[in-house]
Amino acid sequence: MSDTETTGPAESRTPAAAPPAPVWWSRPAGPQPAAGPQPAPGPDAAAPPAVTPTIPGPRYDPWGAPLHVADAGRPRPVRRWTLVAGGVAIAVLAGGVGGYAGVLAERQASTRLELPQAGPESGHREPGSVAGIAATALPGVVTLHVSGGSGGGTGTGFVLDHTGHILTNNHVIAGAKRIYVTFSTGESVSAELIGHDTGYDLAVVKVEGVRGLKPLALGNSGNVRVGDPVVAIGAPFDLSNTVTAGIISATGRPITAGGDKGDGSDVSYVDALQTDAPINPGNSGGPLLDARARVIGINSAIRGAEKSGSDGQSGSIGLGFAIPINQGKRVAEEIIHTGRATHPVIGVTLDMRYQGDGARVESQTEGGPAAKAGIRPGDVITKVDGQRVHGGDELIIKIRAHRPGDPLTLTVQRGTREHTLELVLGSANGS
C-alpha cells in the first residue's frame, strides 16, 4: 500500500506546509513524490508556500557514500593589511636566515680556503739532471770540521774507497790537530790524516768503523770540453750538502794559490778546470761532477770579488777552479801508498824575476833531465808540448800536470834562434 493512499471518502484537505530543509543537506534532484492527493488547481487556489533557498553545498546521495563535511558557512574576507603584515614578516625572516647563512658560509670559506695545487709526484729524476746527479753523489760527499792552534775551519771531501779514504784539499786540513768528518746522513766521526802535498794542494784522511761508505766514481779530466755541464757539491760557509750547477768555462787554466807563508813553500800550482758553478769558502775539497755523476775535478780555489768587510771572505763571482781528477787520482794513490806524493821535474832553477815572455832558466841540475836534453842557463822556455807559456809559474804548472817519467817536448829560445828539445821528466819528493 502506498503511503499516499486513504481509506475514507475523498474530501478536500489543505496539505500541511513542509518544514524548511536543514542547511546541511538538500533534497534529491528531480520530481518530488506527492505527499497525498493533490486538488486540481483553481482560480482561487492558494499559492504554494515559498521554499527557503538553500545554500549551495554538497548534495546528499542516499545511495552513495555518506558525506562527513560540515558547512562552516561563507569564507571570511582577508583584509589587505593582514597580507601586507604577513609579507613583511616573511621578508624579515627570510632576510635574517639568508644573512646568517651568508655569514656562516663566509666563515667556512675563510677557514677552508684551498687553492689549486699539483698532486704528489714520484721523487724520481733523470740520472743526467742536476737532481739526479746530486742524488747519486751526495751519499759520498762529506763535510770536514777541523780545529787547531790557530782556530778551526770547514771544508769538503769525498769518499775514494770502501776502506774509508777521503780526498780533500791540503789547505782545508793544514795545521789541524783534530779532524771530524760528517756524512750526508748527519753521522759524524773523527778522521786521521794519512798524508798531504802542498804543491798540489791535496790531502787524504781516513775514517774507521764506518759501514756503507759510498765511494764516488772517478771520471777522466782529459775528456772534459769547454761548455760541458757540471755540478759542484760542498759546504759553503758551513752549509753542508749544498749543490750548485754550471758549465766548464775553460780547461788548462794555470793558477797558483796559497803563498801565505811568504817563502813559496805553501804555493800550489794547478793546471785547473775553470767553472762558473758557484763555489764559495767551504766548497774546497769537494767534487766537481760531470753529467754522469763522475768526479772530474776537486774544487780548490776561486777568484772572488774585492773584499769589502773585515771577515776576509768573499763570495763567488763565477770564477771557480778545480784540480783535474787525473792529477788528483795520481797524487791520492801515492799518498795512500807512501804517505806523500812525488813531483815531476826537469832539473832547472827558474829566474822568477824575469819580465819577458816565457820562463828563463837561471841554472840547471847537473845530470838532470834538462841538462841531458841540452838546455843551458839563459835559455828561455816558450812552449811545453806546443802550448805557449808566459812565465815561470805557467811552466811549473804545465810540468806538474804530467807524471814523473812522462816524455816532454820543450821549445827553447836561445838568442835569436829557436830550438825544440825532447826530455823525460824526473821525480822529486813533494812537501
Image (spheres, rainbow, N blue to C red):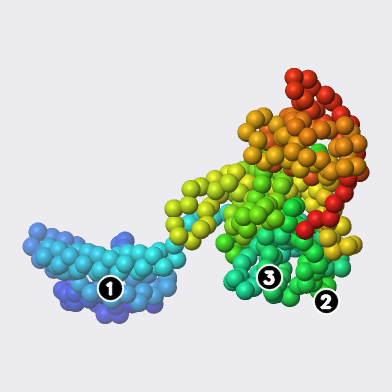
Q: Position of residue 51 (x, y in %)?
A: 16, 67
Residue drawn 68% across the image and 36% down it: 391
Q: Amino acid at mark 2?
A: Gly
Look at the picture and state if 242 lies above or below 24. Answer: above
Q: Nearer the viewer, residue 425 or 34?
A: 425
Quadrant of res 147: bottom right
Q: Do the CB atoms of the residues marked 2 and 3 lie less than 8 Å apart?
A: no
Instruction: Give the residue at mark 1.
Output: 25
Q: How many numbered circles are shown?
A: 3
Q: Position of residue 238 (x, y in %)?
A: 59, 64
Left or right of 80 in this view: 150: right
Q: Do the CB atoms of the residues marked 3 and 1 lie less than 8 Å apart?
A: no
* Mark seen at residue 209: 2
Marks 2, 3: nearer the viewer: 3
N-terminal label among 2 and 3: 3
Q: Nearer the viewer, residue 85 or 154?
A: 154
Q: Nearer the viewer, residue 336 or 296?
A: 336
Look at the picture and state if 426 lies above or below 157. Answer: above
Quadrant of res 406: top right
Q: Do the CB atoms of the residues marked 2 and 1 lie less than 8 Å apart?
A: no
User: Given the current orientation, which residue lies at the most extreme top position?
Assistant: 416
Q: CA distance from mark 2 to mark 1?
A: 115 Å
N-terminal label among 2 and 1: 1
